Amino acid sequence: MPPRLSPGLLTALAHRLTPRDYTLLQALHDQRLLTTQQVAALFFGRRSSRRARTRLLTLHRLGVLERFRPHTAPGSAPWCWVLASAGVHLLARHRDQPAAELAPRAERALALAHSARLHHHIGVREVLVAATLAARTDEGHRLEIWWDEARCAQEWGTYIRPDAFLRYRHPGGAVDAFLEYDTGTEPLARVAAKLPGYEHLAEATRITTPLLLTTTAATRETNLAERLAEEPAPHVPVWLTTAAQLLDPGPAEPVWRPLRDGPHRSLTDLHRPAAQT
């Protein structure tokens, strides 16, 4: 049983945390969970995974973080990290707000350990990591906005429930886009059934926002493109890629393909109309 979180214990723990630790706690609160690899890429650099593992283990032993592995593949699945009770209290102190306001989100994060949506959640965060790293690579680039599924539902739930909304700013302007992450388990028809919602939203707001569809394998990407191309030509541009392409060469490279014939585009070049008619 973890020690009682007395003010003295929290003060002692606070002295053990670095500014980077607090940034990590905030990210875990915002994203609910991140894998070891995702934490390493965001906060330590991809070549510093050993340092990331060492620090995560230290924070775990201090009771600041909790961890679990997906039950489907315990030998090879990555560790997933969430805020423990002490982490919630320390972040609340750092933000000067009651811990009770942060605790429910941390509890929902821990519940993902037994959720069928865990792999989907991890996949969406892989896109976040890829976009963040791409923005760090080029001067004048930044991931300006990333809204998760819950925030998107608050904004547009009448029409759509995307996995994320992002704004990627670059020297030539900014790209707004919705994200759907496909794990390859849904029938193609169910994925296609999501498109009318984006069309209705564009009609209601008179704002056309591209839809980015990321999936797990090249074969699935091809099958999705062929199935979605059977639908009436959408006014909302739909671009597809795979998780592997987001990791290398990255979303800011020409890895996004249109539904129909046309060249692949980079994330910064999606404002031009695609050949989808």
Image (tube, grey):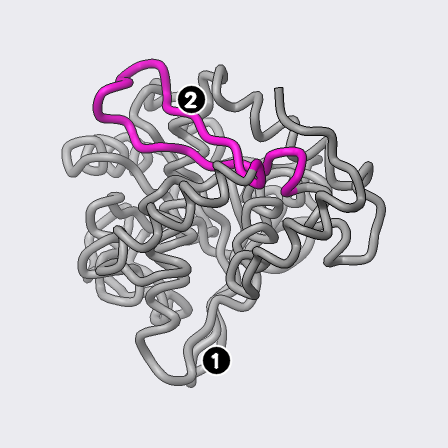
Q: Any magenta on residue 24?
A: no
Residue shown at the point (28%, 58%) measured from the top left: 275
* Secondary element at tag 2: helix
Residue extending furthest toward the right: 98
Q: From the top left corner, tell me how far across and down residue 160 is, in percent.
A: 60, 37
Q: From the top left corner, tell me how far across and down residue 23 is, in percent.
A: 56, 59
Say above or below: 75 vs 275: above
Q: From the top left corner, tell me how far across and down residue 272 is, in percent.
A: 37, 70
Residue shown at the point (66%, 39%) measured from the top left: 86
- What residue span does the magenta drawing correspond to? 63-87
Viewer-nearest residue: 251 or 211: 251
Left or right of 56? Residue 47 is left
What label does residue 190 carry, if any? 2
Viewer-nearest residue: 104 or 129: 104
* Secondary element at tag 1: strand
Quarter of the image for residue 14 reads: bottom right
Q: Any magenta on residue 74?
A: yes
What label does residue 173 carry, if any? 1
The earlier-in-sequence mark between 2 and 1 is 1
Say above or below: 20 vs 83: below
Residue density around tag 2, few if under 14, some if 14–19, many if 20 or more, within 10 Å = few
Under mark 2, the amino acid is Arg
Quarter of the image for residue 44 reads: bottom left
Left or right of 22? Residue 93 is right
